[in-house]
Amino acid sequence: DYINEAVEVSSDFSFGEAYDKEWALKDQGHREGIKEANQKIIHHMLEKYDVDSITKITGIPKDEVLSYLESN
């Protein structure tokens, strides 16, 4: 019964589509969390370091650091 159910579910395209949407939402949340964390890091580091130093120390791309400066 388990094998038959697994075969049936795997052939149900709406199941795969729902899984893809769930994965995409989790990935989007993960990316937004990283962006928010990077912004906090940049904010605190700007008190002591210049943009080039922040980029070298953190590995955050320079364009992202500059984008943060432009938005604040």
Image (tube, rainbow, N blue to C red):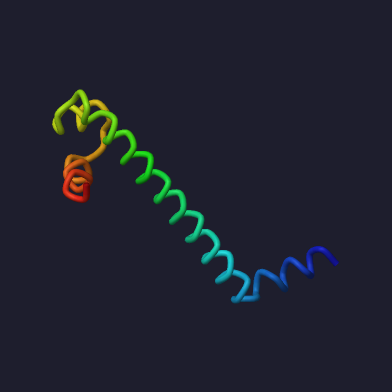
Q: Position of residue 6 (x, y in %)?
A: 74, 66
Image-based side of 46 in relation to 26, left or right: left
Q: Is residue 64 above or below residue 52?
A: below
Image-based side of 14 in relation to 33, left or right: right
Q: 41 or 12: nearer the eye?
A: 41
The N terminus: image quadrant: bottom right
Residue at position x 59%, y 76% in the image: 13
Residue at position x 55%, y 71% in the image: 17
Residue at position x 55%, y 62% in the image: 22
Image-based side of 28 in relation to 46, left or right: right
User: Where on the picture, by quarter, is residue 68?
Assistant: top left
Q: Is residue 50 above or below residue 21?
A: above
User: Looking at the image, which residue sits at the far right?
Assistant: 1
Q: Is residue 28 above or below residue 55?
A: below
Q: Where is residue 67 in the image (x, y as percent from the top left)?
A: 19, 48
Residue at position x 18%, y 44% in the image: 69
Label tally? 0
Q: Position of residue 48 (x, y in %)?
A: 20, 23
Q: 16 or 44: nearer the eye?
A: 44
Q: Where is residue 20 in the image (x, y as percent from the top left)?
A: 52, 65
User: Looking at the image, which residue sits at the far top?
Assistant: 48
